[in-house]
Amino acid sequence: MVNTLDPQNFNNFSEASVSVEIETEDMTLNIGPQHPSTHGVLRLVAKVDGEKVYDVKPVLGYMHRGYEKLAEVRSYPQITTLVNRIDWVAGFSNEIPFIAGAERLMEIEVPERAKHIRLILTEMARISSHFVFNGAYALEVGALTPIFYAMEDRERVLDLIESVTGGRFHPNFNRIGGVKPAAGSGPTTKKDIQDLPAGFYRDTKVAMQKVIEAADQFQNLIGGNEVFKKRTKNVGILTAETAEAFGVSGPILRASGVKSDLRTLTDYLPYDQFEYDIPVGENGDCYDRWDVRVKEMVESAKIVLQAIDSMPSGPLQAKVPKVIKVPKGRTYVRAENPKGEMGYYIVSDGGLGPYRLKVRTASFSNISILPLLLEGALLPDLIAIMGSLDFVLGDVDR
Amino acid sequence: MEDFLSKINENFINTDVEFETINIKVDSSQWVETHQKLKDEFDLKFFSWLSAIDWDNEVSIGEAPKESVSPSFEIITCLSNVSNNNLVTVSTTISKLEPKITSLVEIYAGANWHEREAYEMFGINFENHPNLEKLYLPDGYEGNPMLKSFELISREVKPWPGEVDVEGMPEEPESDESVDG
């Protein structure tokens, strides 16, 4: 029997193992469509070599509902209901660019008060969307606790949205020319006193303070966590040039160091009346993408508090014709949604519905970066990178 | 914006401005070079989207165009700059009989998925595309759903519930009567 502990024999062994080439087979790993970390029904077909991912192919379409086709057989007021369901985590934000586009073509001037209400609610939708991201992302990288805090805090914001619009997720609150008279606010017979519900300002102030506190809490609870930092810092780095070429927008683009925000660049809502910062990241890694969103929540809360204080009085609706017909023309209106640039390209032929409606959603372009970002990543980082893009499948597939 | 517009007008012939958006119409043969130029010289590095419109007089869903159009596909891209509000749409018209155009993936990597979507939805072939296959639709799906000739099956099987519908409702308003919401 050969004594393997004998140094001479040991040398022989190592020589033998070097001369034999070990062949490994690549494995194809199917993730989803029913995987909790895919936020719905995204399917990834990953080719892995050990723990290294070297090719990822996203398979889309499990949530494709054909909204662009449906929009061709709907009238403009009916489409508002449809677009609510695109990014269901921030339903209210989806309505804004569509309504603004129709109003632009019809040359309707929206009353200031309606614009302010829209602004407040769309910022609340952003806060609630970022709450979901915060909880879910922490969960994906292994922290179980934050989601309970996030869901509780989000509920406070959703309650406010519900008190005004009557719906938690799908408000369907915007009307061409303004907003719907608020739910549960005064007798329905007298239109002029139907407005924001009683105590809305007071409740909003309390809730926004809580949001600022919650963001601070997240910074400590999640951001200060050593495991979280290890899992997200210098992981999934995205450069600004690549992001722009792929049409990646919103917090992901800002995390890559680009100070770009459609709220300041365009005028779809009166953001120029308020003071707020645009948080920007440095490295473009997962940590920055998380960090930018937490800071954005605070800025949104500040905008809401300012808007509450400077709420103009006046009507909620401009004068609009009974039958909504949009004049012939085309326009593209884009808005800064929680997930990035969302826009509607409306091609109108002067009819009751659009001839063609192109819906540009943020998540679609944002996750088109996945194959590039995941190339060469470690398998455990796949979930961390994917989660940091904060996509919703309704926003990807439409 | 003013300088940008005058520079655009110097370089392109067929331009117009509609609601602060600059529209450039080009021939399909200049499709790629136009985008290359807009990216390099006009600093429009952000690729927003690409899509198509099916122009046809005979439609099986929705309303037909009020004025007669020549049947064709219009392909549109939207480009912008992340640090200012310059927004440009580029459009070109291609024949329906031979729907093909050169892919933009070499210039804007983000065009990849948008072109795949236009390929399955309208049946437009993008030449030189690295991976031109269906994006949303399942394998073996026949037809191009976004064509105006493609019927919405659910409407064929079951008329829309309720009496109030896009098709049922339209009646010209009797007067210019306006209402407060």
Image: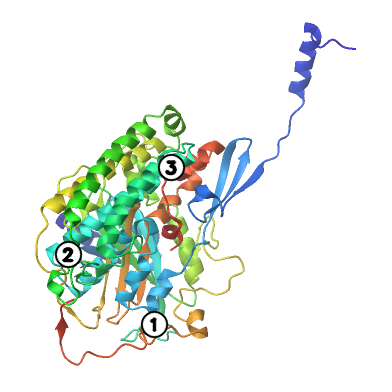
Q: Residue at 13% of width from left, 69% of height from top?
A: A193
Secondary-structure class at tag 2: helix
Picture layout, residue A174 above or below residue A337: below
Quadrant of the rendering where the C terminus of chain A is positioned: bottom left
Kind of residue at disc 2: Ala
Asked whether the residues under marks 1 and 2 belong to the same chain, the reply is no
| As drawn, A110 above or below B80 | below
Q: Is residue A280 visible?
A: no
Classify mark 3: helix, strand or loop: helix
Residue A330, image x, y percentages:
27, 71
Res B12 quadrant in image? bottom left
Label 1: which residue? B62
Crowding around mark 1 (Cα neighbors within 10 Å: few <14, some 14 to 19, many 20+) is: many
**Around disc 2, counting alpha carbons within 10 Å, would you say few (fewer than 14), some (14 to 19), or many (20 or more)?**
many
Q: Position of residue A232 (x, y in %)?
A: 43, 34
Question: Does residue A84 show up?
Answer: yes
Image coords of residue B158 (percent x, y): 49, 84
Protein chain holding label 2: A
